[in-house]
Amino acid sequence: MSQLLKINNLSGGYHQEAIVRDVSFEVNSGDFLGVIGPNGSGKTTLLRLLSRVLPAQRGSIFLQGQDIRKLDLKEFCQKVAFVQQDTAINFSFTVWEIVLMGRIPHLKRLQPESLHDREIAQNALIMTDTTELKEKAIDELSSGERQRAIIAKALTQEPVLLFLDEPTSHLDIGHQIQILDLLKKLNRQNDLTIVMVLHDLNLASEYCNRILLLDKGKVYREGAPEEVLNYRNIEAVYKTVVVVKENPISKKPYCILVPEEERKHGH
Amino acid sequence: MKKSIPVLFILLFLAAALGVLKGSVQIPLKDFLLKDSQPIVQLRILRIFLAAIAGSGLAVSGIVLQAILRNSLAEPYLLGTSSGAGLGAVIAIILGVSGIYLPLAAFLGAVLSIILVYNLARENNKIPEQSLILSGVIVSVALSAIIVFLISISGNEALHEITWWLWGSLQVFDLKLLLTVAAIVLAGIAAIFCFAQDLNAISIGEEEAMHLGVDIERVKKILILITSLITASLVCICGIIGFVGLMIPHMMRLVVGPNHKVLIPVTCLAAACFMIACDTLSRTLIPPLEIPIGVITAILGAPTFIFLLKHKARIK
């Protein structure tokens, strides 16, 4: 497996204050990396640093061996796409118009989309099962539909690497699974490398092949779900009590939370 | 969507024809080509040209501000940009500045007022809708008051009257200035059209635009400067005219949708028609009196503003 992303001693944040501190890790192509950690541990900040929304204060990020600061922004966006937590859009663009915007990094100013560009967008609609929504206004969709349309836009960029910041946090369990199944399929079949921030430890465990556990802006543990998700790590970072079992179907670690009242009963 | 452009061209032609034919002085159709009528006809043609330029320029400025601020209520008049430009121009005239320096002074006023409103409205790097409109209106009222004060005390004849500044007029008083302003406005609109794709990306969100490779800080600066230049040049030649940048983009989004590649040309044509019609109304409603053009646009624009404010959740 080839190395896609290499992060060396990365620090960054807002107003001189470093929220992510001295983080180093690698992402191989084909990885499905889940970034987990408590609130304020720097998950979103890390993603913003990796996607160039925030400039790094220290350290470096290499994409396919190239320092991302030296890449042209458009060139960078031809390789890397980003799906935000909740994309509330005020303007009534149609789904098709939104998805087609994914071609912007590939087009020059005033250059119209070619047939080839349209085919790529059409394909993204098919992959995300949004073809029927094509002519609908984006602000009239349900959250699940909208998130699929936004993923279709990201796929239209034809990225090698996709960042997602809690893409399922506003969705019910059915829609969460639908989105994550879609991502898994893209990861497997299209060889799309995914780095995703997730709150739900069990979803991260089921879908990701590697997990990065952040604590106070630093990497606490990194590795396969079985290596990271044990009760010692989770209790140390999240300051709570959990029991970790094995999911009988997938054999992945499964965290069971323990309310305080139950703890007193000596379980 | 494709049909709207020919339809608007026909409307524009009709509005212009009506504007030439009607006015406070009635000219019978058969006398139109007579030599005696030529000065009046020429004046009317210049007015119609100015109306078309002013309408398009103000409406496209509205589109840009709405996309950048992701707020359907943004518009040069309501954000105080026009008043800032007006104040710049008044000060320049009092200091005896003329020619190309007049639009430049107005431009300076416009940029300063945008920076002022933006910083007044900003709370933790976000711009809440209410505080944006509130800051805009406050700055606008304060700067208009200064304009009135300066005109009242200066007695400078080149300054026109207070109503001219505050409510606008499409009377052409300086052909050279008209041509300069027209060149600036048309070049500005063409430049903005080149950013149509960036405007689409920015209107779905700043971070979204960054993830699509748009250098938003640079693009925003360029667009705000062009918008200020358009607004400022127009204020120099026709005073402050409000609500056009609010009404026409809103209506055209209902017809053709928010895609700026289509929205910008369609809005230009529609706004030109609209201004010519408003100007014709202003000259013919109570002849021989001329109702200030800004009064007509405000009477039509205020209800649109209220409607948008009540339905602000959705920019259609």
Image (cartoon, coloured by chain):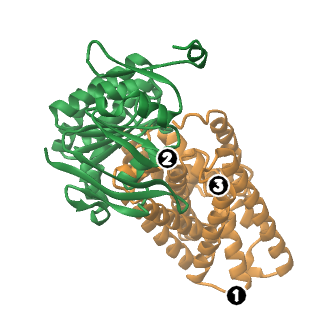
**Residue at horizontal 71 percent and vertical 55 percent from the top:** B135
**Mark 1 residue element:** loop
Q: Colour of chain A?
A: green
Crowding near pointer 1: few (<14 within 10 Å), some, many (20+)?
few
Q: Which residue is mark 2?
A: A216
Whether residues under marks 1 and 2 lie with C-beta atoms below 8 angstroms apart, the answer is: no
Q: Which residue is mark 3?
A: B122
**Residue at horizontal 36 percent and vertical 41 percent from the top:** A221
Foreground mark, 1 or 3, reads: 3
Q: Is residue B227 above or below residue A247?
A: below
Foreground mark, 3 or 2, reads: 2
- Residue A152 is situated, as x and y percent measured from the top left of the image, at 30, 34
Q: Quadrant of the N terminus of chain B?
A: top left
**Residue at horizontal 54 percent and vertical 69 percent from the top:** B229
Say if residue B240 shows up in the picture.
no
Residue A229, disc:
none
**Residue at horizontal 70 percent and vertical 49 percent from the top:** B131
* Quadrant of residue B41 within the rendered picture: bottom right
